[in-house]
Amino acid sequence: MTAFRAMIRWSLRHILGRKRLVGLGLFGLVPAVVMAVVGQTASDASLLKEFHAGPLLTVLFGVLPITTLVLGAAALGEERRDGTLSFLLLRPTSRTSIVGAKLASVWLGSFLIVGGSVGLAALVLGVRSGHWTPFGPVLLAMAISTLAYAAAALALGYLTGRAVLIGLAYLVILENGLALAIDGMATVSLMRIGLTAYWALLPDRTAAVAFSEINQLMASLAPGALGAAAKALVIAGLVVAGTAWLLRHRDVA
Amino acid sequence: MTESPALVEHPTVEARAVSKWFGQKVAVSDLSCSFGPGITGLLGPNGAGKTTLLRMLTGLLGPSDGEVRIMGKDPRRSPEVYRHLALVPEEDAVYGFQTAREFVAYSAVLAGTDPRSAEEAIATVRLEDSADRPISGYSKGMRQRAKVAAALVGRPDLLVLDEPLNGTDPVQRAHLIDTFRTLAREGHTVIVSSHVLAEVERMSGRVLAMVDGKLAAAGDIAAIRRAMSHIPYRVRIETDLPRRMAAALVEIDSVAGVELDGETLHAETTDLEGLGRSIAGVAARLDARVSRFEPEDESLESVFRYLVRRR
């Protein structure tokens, strides 16, 4: 096993402790439960709209940011606080490789929960109404958004012990506040990176465009999967380079 | 030949006029020293700056001033030096969810060494029987041994150990000391920090003593011992006749002073063994019963402070 793969493996095991996995896993079930409950009363024709208004928004505003924040903050932040970061740094492994492995583990761990959450909700939608088209796009879109969020949370977790708190403040103030109120702010929204990808990948978008919740969230952002993926990759690249630089130059207490 | 006893002729690791401060607090001040093959003990009371110096030597901390070289290279700019270096930190830098076998094997993979060296390292610290249990259930001594095993994989040229014997029982301690001595005989550079003189004395001939971030003394252990021989020991004596015992003790030449604290006496002496021998006679003469006779300061902090004042 290479050092990079070993770091991903053990980092995943570290961030996905039993309590965390159970807590986030149960939280991740909420969108599917919402979809199942809505499915009992709504008509088949309106279920796609209900999927966007309920489970998808729950994932975008809840499961996605909270999962990535909790896991991302733990990846380097807990290693720094527990003193195990020196165990990694005193090896002939580049700092870039360490941060890259950490990001990969946060992304994989987060996507396991976020993808599972939204995938399960989309599965309920498909089984209940026969709308299978959102399944692939929503998974791909969440993979992209999870990468952007995971990168931001990883850096934040390394820089401060209050990463989750700061992340939640960002979620409330920017994602839920400024990005909705000021049109231009939507471009710096991490959550909307995935949303633009989803909107671009959804085959029956013409019918779905009428859904006011998504339109409102998108503001003036243009749908585009490649652009969204590029944005997430640039954020990930910047975080890896910047955090690796900090690991080289900052003291490890 | 080098002029200062703090420097060696063929150093593996060097600190050149290094200082480290954290805000207003100076942790290490203008310290120059070097380490070569064999064991060097880094001695000093808690808070002397030993850990800060070791973390600078390994590149975890950057010096505020001065420079550090490992095999001629700056560890903060050349991660390849970590192929030759391992640190056993003082704190519990282990993953509690891993077993010792997994922890040591992980260390071997990260070091780029043969995974079989993990088994060898586990056997070296005699942890085979517990190696498949999660580290979170280990005692302090077992955790120490797991950390030492993780450091030993690949037999690094430079082994830096920060208080490695903390929490170990006498048998484990003796075995670890033997292990370090074997490595030193094989030509590895071993740096061991401790606040217990007796531990360092068993491991090492060469000692650097630090106090308040400065180098207080350097050289062989006998020289350090000689430097300490003038310092009075403080002894606690508990007896049923403290006042009469105090009066008798001040008559003894080697007793520099006696203090009465309730039923307890505190005596200062430059000849601890002599006082130990005399006290039995004094007690017999006074018909007193001595229930306790023990040196008060085992951390040797006062000794180190004396060394600093002497500079």
Image (tube, coloured by chain):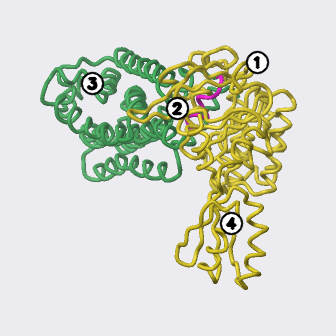
Chain colours: A green, B yellow
Question: Callout 4: helix, strand or loop?
Answer: strand
Q: Are marks 3 and 4 in contact (CB under 8 Å)?
A: no
Query: Mark 4 — residue?
Result: B294
Question: Callout 3: helix, strand or loop?
Answer: helix
- The answer to whether A93 is drawn above or below residue A214 in the figure is above
Residue A135 visible in the displayed image:
no
Q: Amino acid at mark 4?
A: Glu
Write the start and end of the magenta stretch as one range. Answer: A84-92
Mark number, residue B28: 2
Q: Chain of mark 3?
A: A
Q: Chain of mark 2?
A: B
Residue A221, how many percent across, how many down? 22, 19
* Cα distance between the residues tagged 3 and 4: 85 Å
Q: Are marks 1 and 2 in contact (CB under 8 Å)?
A: no
* Cα distance between the residues tagged 4 and 2: 33 Å
Q: Chain of mark 4?
A: B
Question: Callout 1: helix, strand or loop?
Answer: loop
* Cα distance between the residues tagged 3 and 1: 76 Å
- The answer to whether A100 is drawn above or below residue B284 in the figure is above
Query: Do the dots labelled 4 and 2 sit on one chain?
Result: yes
Question: Callout 2: helix, strand or loop?
Answer: strand
Query: Mark 1 — residue?
Result: B9
Query: Mark 3 — residue?
Result: A205
In the displayed structure, does residue A129 sit left or right of residue A41? right
Q: Residues within 10 Å of mark 4 (few under 14, many from 20)?
A: some
Of tags 4 and 2, the one toward the viewer is 4
Q: Are marks 3 and 1 in contact (CB under 8 Å)?
A: no
Count of marks, rendered view = 4
* Cα distance between the residues tagged 1 and 2: 23 Å
